[in-house]
Image: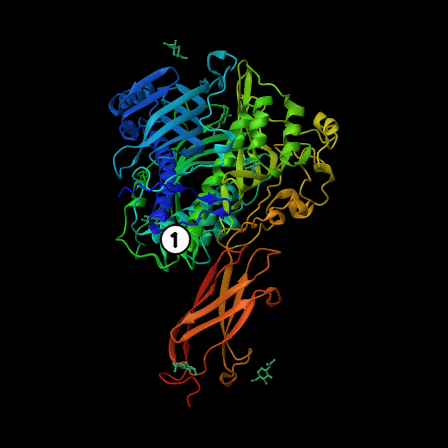
Amino acid sequence: MRLSRLLLWTFVGGAGVHAAATLDELADDVSRVESLREIKDATATFAQLAQFGRYAEMADLFSPDGVLLWGNTSVQGPEAIRRWLEEDAGDMNGRGPGSLDTLVLATPLVNLGADGRTAKGRWNGWRFQGDGKGLTRMRGGVWENEYARVEEGGRWRMRVMRYYELYEGAYEGGWRNVGGRDFGLVPEFHYTAEEAGVPIPKGEVGGGDVVEGSNLERRIEDLNDEDEVRNLQHAWGYYVDRRLWGEVGELFGSHDWGVVRIDNVGVFEGPNGIREGLERWMGPEGLKQGVLNEHLIFDTVVKIRDEVDPDVPNAEKMADARGVEIGLIGDQEKGTALWRFSFFQNSFVKRNGIWQIHNVTIAPLVVANYSDGWGYGGVMAKSTVEPVFLDYTAKRRKKPDTAPKESLSELSRRLSRSYGYEGAESISNAYGFYIDFIDGAACSLMAAIHHPLANKESPFAGFYHTRQRVLEACTQAYGTSARLTRSGISFHWRPQPVIHVSQDGRSASLRARLLQPATDKTSSGTIRGGMYHDQMVLDENGSWKLWSVTIDEFYWSMNNWKEGWGGVEVRDKNAPDQPPPRDLVRQFPPDLWLNEMEGEREVGFMGGRERYVSWPEIQRMWFGYRNPVSGGVPKDGSYWPGCVPCYQHKPEWAMTKHGWQEPPTGPTLVRAMFAAGNGSSEWDDGTFITVWVTPGPGEVVEGVVKLTGRDVGLEYLLTEKDGGRVMFELPRNLSGGFHLLEATFLGSSRLNPGRDVIDLTLPGGPGSLLGN
Ligand SMILES: *[C@@H]1O[C@H](CO)[C@@H](O)[C@H](O)[C@H]1NC(C)=O
Ligand SMILES: *[C@@H]1O[C@H](CO)[C@@H](O)[C@H](O)[C@H]1NC(C)=O
Ligand SMILES: *[C@@H]1O[C@H](CO)[C@@H](O)[C@H](O)[C@H]1NC(C)=O
Ligand SMILES: *[C@@H]1O[C@H](CO)[C@@H](O)[C@H](O)[C@H]1NC(C)=O
Ligand SMILES: *[C@@H]1O[C@H](CO)[C@@H](O)[C@H](O)[C@H]1NC(C)=O
Ligand SMILES: *[C@@H]1O[C@H](CO)[C@@H](O)[C@H](O)[C@H]1NC(C)=O
């Protein structure tokens, strides 16, 4: 259907989130968010297919006139692209014995065109290849791609894949700048600083062919579910990195149904089995000095299933996630270091409104000793898992049309939360892309993607408050003019985000890795890792902006390619606790110094308090969110929600002081329990259901709790004084026999909704509880 009304379309207006005025407008909004996701999924699938040398399917992701620009190569049309991909890979195609072709496209910043039919996207990427016979190749760079939806109702395809190859090299010797040259011009950004925060711009309603009005309620629900499944998948990865097997186990829910399959290692079932499997594959609980267990997750595609699998107990919905994993493993004290290139394909199930992991399959393709590299194919037997690729295009065409039950404004609100997920990811990656090419010009761009009242950490120094101060701190360090050349670059990838969007879709909290590949023209490259803890807001102009940026660095590092992460000396115990302050601290003092932040948050960080911890010592990992399934906080107390400086030190910098909602920190757990009387076993005192609503620490429960079922419809407004607990007395004339009751917390401006189901059998058979 094409509409030609010239209404200005946007998710936001002066007043905040866009509320669709008609179903057609809502349908248009839904299609555009789905489009953005499909573009990311198509690109991720391109990377996933490369692991198996499936170049024909990769070429099929291009439009008929599609162009591949790879370095100085230009090829047009799917068939020519297939041929080029095939030839370029040679035997490094992931097909032959020991062959490796792991491609990742990370950190997307995608902007849909106003027409709804075109898009542009920037990505960081790596490609690690080997032919199993000794030949290796590593490549890294930036993609600036163009996408188009060619046919009416058709799928999104790549029209231009434009790869700027920035560094390359064989495994032996590592990577360097391409051609051993200085970098000249920065690969062109397809967006302005303002557009970076507007993944879906203003457009006409019905512009292009994006209006597809069917089954909107379910499609919005699926988009919201997709956010939660993606968070769960990414959160799994951070617990795995720290070998927090207790936390990992909780992601499967409190029952015996979980399965972990590690190819060529075993199939492990139930809580004890899963722990055993994880320990066997990755080692015992926790990290001790020198242990690296990084499992970088890339190119995650999530698909919500249309139907649940009838064999899966209590399944409300199911989903699958698939992606690429690169493991940086080792134990420095034992002198071991390994690369592990894998793929994963996992299933998820929603129970009582909370997504849990159903099963995990990890399939290692090449596992190689660091000192040997992967050229000869590594040390692991060939994978036996059949790769299954997810049909991400199915989102828009499923289910017969059903009229929405919820109001238009409620549906718009729910959709705006998924749009917020996209906005947060875009602005997070925009930050990384600007910082990569930092100089005076990039300082202005970097500052411009902050809200005027934002705060941002300058590493090893402290936090600057307000956009103006962020800009001045940057130019203090990097000057005000653009650099025409640079001999090396430290990239700031922000992959694997876990994003919590507020209930009104206008703010978000984000954790992402800092993954820092570095390249230089004369020496071999290195990689380092850290962590970002950020918040973002939607500003009055409809653009997502950074509100708070915290950088915890570094967790692990390399001194040079040859020795890798295993070759870093332990820091001298007699060295000073902290180095002298950065020049920046003296020349342009921060508004909050790291070393003045009382309490534990900055203990152990360089520039922070007490002795700084340096790889191969183990840096403490902070979490801004709770366990996405159990709702628990990290057992060692490393929980620090929201804006890092705001939580204890600068509460006046918090977004809640300026009209935004604090995003949730995880699930709201609801537990309903049956109690006869007030704890006594006497029936004649009435029959009570007690409902507990449990949020995160320090979060107040305010909102409506409902208890519903056959002949039961009770409701209570919880306020702060209730402490998250309400006792419902069941109607005294309730019939005997089996009852299924649902306790629902409807949520609040801070808390996610939650629910529980309780069944009970009342005495007396048919007839009154009191037996008359
Ligand atoms: C293309 O790039 C390669 C590698 O950088 C270089 O060797 C080759 O000379 C270039 N070809 C052209 C036509 O510029
Ligand atoms: C995971 O669950 C899905 C859905 O029930 C099933 O099809 C698949 O075989 C399971 N995989 C493993 C490894 O158990
Ligand atoms: C890895 O290589 C090193 C150095 O060649 C060697 O000492 C070590 O035994 C190798 N480890 C494995 C697991 O093959
Ligand atoms: C919104 O746009 C106006 C006009 O360009 C500008 O003056 C204002 O600062 C912007 N607001 C924010 C929060 O950046
Ligand atoms: C609890 O129930 C018992 C038995 O019905 C009654 O004697 C007692 O007063 C009740 N206590 C409260 C606090 O309501
Ligand atoms: C129980 O009593 C209430 C009010 O007295 C009445 O509305 C309801 O219909 C009755 N329910 C049953 C199952 O008899």
**Is 709 on the left-hand or right-hand side of 502?**
left
Decide: few, some or many residues near mark 1? Use Cα within 10 Å; few <14, some 14-19, many ≥20.
many
Kindly tell me whether residue 154 is visible in this rendering. yes
Quarter placement of the N terminus: top left
In this picture, is 224 found above or below 47? below
Residue 236: x and y in percent read 48, 45
| Relative depth, front residue between 143 and 402 | 402
**Is 158 on the left-hand or right-hand side of 575?**
left
| Relative depth, front residue between 190 and 316 | 190
Residue occupying image coordinates x 59% and y 51%: 635
| Relative depth, front residue between 153 and 533 | 153
Kindly tell me whether residue 459 is visible in this rendering. no
Colour scheme shown: rainbow
Q: Residue furthest front?
A: 6
In this picture, is 465 found above or below 599? above
**Is 729 on the left-hand or right-hand side of 393?**
right
Quarter placement of the C terminus: bottom left
Q: Residue furthest bottom?
A: 772
In this picture, is 730 found above or below 499? below
Residue 334: x and y in percent read 56, 32
| Relative depth, front residue between 157 and 208 | 208
Q: Quadrant of residue 719?
A: bottom right
- The residue beneath circle 1 is 349
